[in-house]
Image: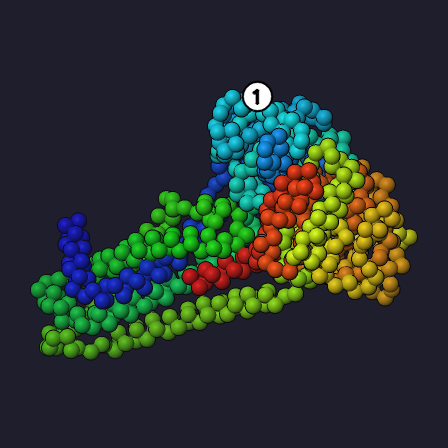
C-alpha cells in the first residue's frame, strides 16, 4: 500500500507538470465514459430497475396470440371472465383501463385522469392504503353504489391533504361518488400500461387522479377489446406451466365462442417487464453497443497519447531501471498513472453524462416507458455509480496496459546515451501506434455507417406522406360521460352545436369530431361484406362527424363524404383505399354494403348493413413509419344509444379544427365556444397536429439526438 500511494503521488506530480496532456486525455476519456453512462442510466431505469410492487417477477400480462405471429395485450370482457376461472395458476387477476372523467360540482370543472380497475387490482399491486379501504367484490358488481379511491397526489392537490375527505363525496361527470379510500404515492399504475386506447394522451409512468371500479358483467358476451388484464402467478407456478394451462383452456374457449377466435391461435401470459419494455429493449441495447465503440475510440486516442509521451520518457525510465527498478515496478507505476487518468475521466464523464441525458430526455424523450415525464425517473443509483466505476477501471487498464508494456522494455544502453528528450520512437512503438490508429478508423467507420443509416431513416420518415395535412389543425379532448350522454341524441346535439359555434369564428376553416386522432388512437373491429359470407376480415374503425375529412384535407377518391343529412338517413360507411384494393380489386365497392362488428357484443347484436358511399385516401393512423392499414369511417350520429354510451365511456371525444392562422392563437376562443355548447364541460390535452406528428417520430428523434450528443 505504501508503494501504491507513492505511485499515486508521483502520477499527480507528473500530470501537473504536463497540464495540456492531462486535460486532453481526461477530456477524451470523459467523452467516452459520458456517452456510456448516459445510455446506461436509461437502460438501468427501463430494463434493470424492478417495479415497486411486491415480488414483481411474478406479475404477468395476459395476451392474445395471432396467426400472423404477433400478440396483443388488450382483452374483452368475455376473455377476462374466462381467465378469472384459471385459479390453479394465478393468485389474482385484474382488469384495468385508462380513462378520463369530468370533475364537476365546482366553480370550474376540470378533466381528470381516472383508471377503471377490478377489485383484485390493489391486492395484486400490494397497494399501501393510507386511509379507508380499496374496492371489494361488492363494489365491483354491476349497479353497485358509485365509489372512488383517491391517489396521493390528487388528494394533496384537490383536498389539501385533509383526512376528513375520506368518507365524503365528489362529483364526477355529474354523478356523486363516495370517497372510500386513499392509496400511497408508491402505486404508479402507469408502469403497467401498454399500447391501449388513449395512451397517446397519457404520461404512462404517472399515477392517475382517481380509481373507479370497473364493474364488468360476469356474464358478459361482449368481445370488444378495450382494456388490459394482469395477474400474479401463484407461488411455485412456473411461467411455462401457466401458459400450458391457458392454452388448454383456449381450446374450450374456442368451442364456446367460435366467432371470437378468427385470426387467433391462443392465449398466453408474459412477464410484466417484458410486456412493457419489450418494444424498446433492442433499440436501447443497440445504442449501448454503439456508444461502447465511442469509448473504444477514446481509449485508442489516449493510448496513442501515452505512447507519444513515453517516447519522451525513455531516458527517465532507463534511469529508474539503472538504479534498481524492476520491470514489474515500472509497469505498476505506469498503470497507476493510467488509472488516475481514467478515474478523473470517470468523475467528469459521470457528471457530463447525467446532465446530458437529462437535457436530452427533456427535449426529446421518445416513446420510452418507465422514464417518467421528461425523463424524471432517470436518476443516479448504485447501479449507475458501479457501472461508471467499473468502466473507468476497465478503461484505465485497456488504454494503459499496452503503453506500459512497451515503455517497460527500454533499451538501457541506448536510452542513457540519448540526450534530453530528442529520442525517436522505436519500431515496435510505431507498429503499435499504427495498429491503434487503424482500430480507431475501423470503429469510427462503423459509427459513421450507423449514423448514416439513422440519418437516412430520419429523412425518409419526414418524406412520408401521412395522408392528411397537419398544418393549421388544432385538437382537443372532451369527456362525454354522464346521464345526458347516455343517448346518441345527446352526443349528436353537443357535436352539432359545438361545430356550429366553432365554425362561426372568423379564422376557422373547418371543424369536426372523431374518436381517434390520426397517429394517436386506434380501434379495430371485424366486418363482413353483405351477401358475401366468405368475404370477412378485420379493419380499423374510426368514428367521425361531418367535416372530419375537410378538416384534415383527406382526399376523396370516389363517391362522397358524410353530410348532416346522413345523421337521420340510412346507415352509411366510408372506406379507405387500402381496404378497397384488398376486397374490391376489380369491382366497385360503392355497390356493396358492410356489416360492422355484428355479434361483437350486446351493443352490436343487431348491427344493420351500411352502404359504402365513398373511398378516401389512406391515412397513417397507426404510426408514421408503418404502412396504412385497412380502415372504415362511421358517422357518430348513426350509433345506437347503447353503442354511443359504451364508446364514449371508453374514449374522450376529440375536436379537430382547421384554422387560417396559428392554431394555438384560437385555443381560448374555441374552448369558450365548446364550454357553452356542452353545458360547461372542460376540454384537455390541447395540441396541434404538428405536435402529434412530431410525437409519432419521437423514437427516431431520440436516436438522432443521442448520436449527435
Residue at 18 percent of width and 72 percent of height: 312
Please state if 383 lies on the left or on the right of 104 as rendered. left
Quarter of the rendering containing residue 641? top right
Which residue matches tag 1? Answer: 167
- Residue 446's spot in the image, x, y percent? 46, 69
Residue 264 makes an appearance in the image: no
- Residue 210's spot in the image, x, y percent? 58, 33
**Helix, strand or loop status at disc 1:** loop
Residue at 27 percent of width and 66 percent of height: 24
* Foreground pick, 266 / 137: 137
* Foreground pick, 707 / 340: 707
* Foreground pick, 594 / 315: 594
Residue 353, compared with residue 269, is above or below; it is: below
Residue at 21 percent of width and 69 percent of height: 310
Label 1 packing within 10 angstroms: few (<14), some (14-19), many (20+): few
- Residue 477's spot in the image, x, y percent? 64, 45
Residue 355, compared with residue 202, is above or below; it is: below
Q: Residue furthest toward the left?
A: 323
For the C terminus, the quadrant is: bottom left
Residue at 63 percent of width and 45 percent of height: 672
Amino acid at each position: 500500500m505504501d508503494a501504491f500511494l507513492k505511485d499515486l503521488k508521483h502520477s499527480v506530480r507528473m500530470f501537473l507538470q504536463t497540464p495540456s496532456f492531462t486535460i486532453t486525455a481526461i477530456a477524451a476519456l470523459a467523452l467516452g465514459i459520458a456517452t456510456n453512462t448516459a445510455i446506461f442510466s436509461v437502460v438501468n431505469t427501463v430494463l434493470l430497475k424492478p417495479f415497486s410492487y411486491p415480488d414483481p417477477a411474478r406479475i404477468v400480462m395476459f395476451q392474445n396470440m395471432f396467426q400472423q405471429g404477433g400478440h396483443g395485450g388488450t382483452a374483452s370482457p368475455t376473455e377476462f371472465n374466462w381467465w378469472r376461472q384459471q385459479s390453479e395458476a394465478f393468485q389474482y387477476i385484474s382488469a384495468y383501463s385508462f380513462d378520463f372523467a369530468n370533475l364537476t360540482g365546482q366553480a370550474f370543472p376540470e378533466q381528470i385522469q381516472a383508471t377503471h380497475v377490478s377489485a383484485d387490482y390493489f391486492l395484486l399491486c400490494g397497494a399501501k392504503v393510507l386511509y379507508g379501504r380499496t374496492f371489494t367484490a361488492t363494489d365491483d358488481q354491476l349497479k353497485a353504489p358509485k365509489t372512488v379511491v383517491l391517489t396521493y397526489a390528487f388528494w394533496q392537490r384537490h383536498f389539501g391533504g385533509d383526512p376528513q375527505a375520506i368518507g365524503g363525496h365528489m362529483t364526477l361527470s355529474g354523478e356523486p361518488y363516495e370517497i372510500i379510500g386513499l392509496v400511497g404515492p408508491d402505486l404508479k399504475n402507469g408502469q403497467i400500461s401498454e399500447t391501449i386506447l388513449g395512451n397517446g394522451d397519457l404520461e404512462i409512468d404517472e399515477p392517475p387522479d382517481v380509481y373507479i371500479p370497473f364493474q364488468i358483467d360476469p356474464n358478459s358476451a361482449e368481445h370488444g377489446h378495450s382494456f388490459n388484464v394482469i395477474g400474479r402467478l401463484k407461488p411455485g407456478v412456473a411461467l411455462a406451466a401457466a401458459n400450458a394451462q391457458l392454452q388448454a383452456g383456449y381450446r374450450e374457449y374456442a368451442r364456446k365462442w367460435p366467432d371470437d377466435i378468427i385470426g387467433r391461435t391462443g392465449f398466453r401470459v408474459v412477464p410484466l417487464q417484458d410486456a412493457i419494455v419489450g418494444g424498446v429493449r433492442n433499440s436501447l441495447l443497440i445504442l449501448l453497443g454503439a456508444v461502447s465503440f465511442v469509448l473504444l475510440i477514446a481509449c485508442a486516442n489516449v493510448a496513442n497519447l501515452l505512447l507519444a509521451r513515453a517516447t519522451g520518457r525513455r531516458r527517465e525510465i532507463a534511469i529508474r531501471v539503472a538504479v534498481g527498478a524492476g520491470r514489474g515496478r515500472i509497469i505498476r507505476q505506469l498503470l497507476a498513472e493510467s488509472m488516475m487518468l481514467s478515474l478523473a475521466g470517470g468523475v467528469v464523464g459521470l457528471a457530463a453524462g447525467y446532465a446530458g441525458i437529462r437535457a436530452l430526455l427533456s427535449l426529446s424523450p421518445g416513446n420510452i416507458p418507465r422514464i417518467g415525464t421528461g425523463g424524471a425517473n432517470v436518476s443516479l443509483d448504485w447501479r449507475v455509480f458501479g457501472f461508471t466505476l467499473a468502466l473507468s477501471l476497465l478503461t484505465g487498464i485497456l488504454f494503459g496496459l499496452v503503453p506500459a508494456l512497451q515503455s517497460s522494455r527500454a533499451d538501457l544502453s541506448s536510452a542513457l546515451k540519448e540526450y534530453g528528450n530528442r529520442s525517436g520512437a522505436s519500431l515496435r512503438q510505431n507498429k503499435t501506434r499504427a495498429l491503434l490508429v487503424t482500430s480507431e478508423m475501423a470503429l469510427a467507420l462503423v459509427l459513421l455507417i450507423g449514423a448514416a443509416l439513422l440519418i437516412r431513416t430520419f429523412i425518409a420518415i419526414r418524406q412520408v406522406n401521412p395522408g392528411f395535412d397537419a398544418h393549421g389543425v388544432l385538437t382537443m379532448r372532451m369527456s362525454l360521460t354522464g346521464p345526458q350522454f347516455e343517448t346518441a341524441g345527446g352526443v349528436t346535439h353537443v357535436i352539432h352545436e359545438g361545430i356550429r359555434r366553432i365554425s362561426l369564428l372568423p379564422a376557422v376553416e373547418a371543424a369536426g369530431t372523431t374518436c381517434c386522432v390520426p397517429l394517436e388512437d386506434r380501434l379495430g373491429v371485424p366486418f363482413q361484406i353483405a351477401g358475401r359470407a366468405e368475404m370477412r376480415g378485420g379493419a380499423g374503425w374510426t368514428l367521425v362527424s361531418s367535416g372530419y375529412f375537410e378538416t384534415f384535407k383527406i382526399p376523396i377518391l370516389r363517391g362522397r363524404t358524410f353530410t348532416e343529412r346522413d345523421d337521420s338517413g340510412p346507415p352509411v360507411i366510408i372506406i379507405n383505399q387500402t381496404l378497397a384494393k384488398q376486397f374490391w380489386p376489380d369491382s366497385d365497392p360503392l355497390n356493396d354494403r358492410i356489416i360492422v362488428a355484428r355479434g361483437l357484443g350486446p351493443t352490436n347484436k343487431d348491427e344493420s348493413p351500411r352502404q359504402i358511399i365513398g373511398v378516401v385516401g389512406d391515412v397513417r393512423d397507426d404510426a408514421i413509419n408503418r404502412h396504412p392499414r385497412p380502415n372504415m369511417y362511421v358517422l357518430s350520429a348513426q350509433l345506437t344509444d347503447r353503442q354511443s354510451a359504451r364508446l364514449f365511456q371508453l374514449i374522450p371525444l376529440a375536436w379537430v379544427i382547421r384554422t387560417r392562422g396559428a392554431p394555438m392563437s384560437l385555443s381560448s376562443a374555441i374552448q369558450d365556444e365548446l364550454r357553452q355548447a356542452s353545458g360547461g364541460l372542460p376540454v384537455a390535452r390541447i395540441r396541434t397536429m404538428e405536435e402529434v406528428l412530431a410525437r409519432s417520430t419521437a423514437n427516431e428523434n431520440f436516436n438522432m439526438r443521442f448520436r449527435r450528443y
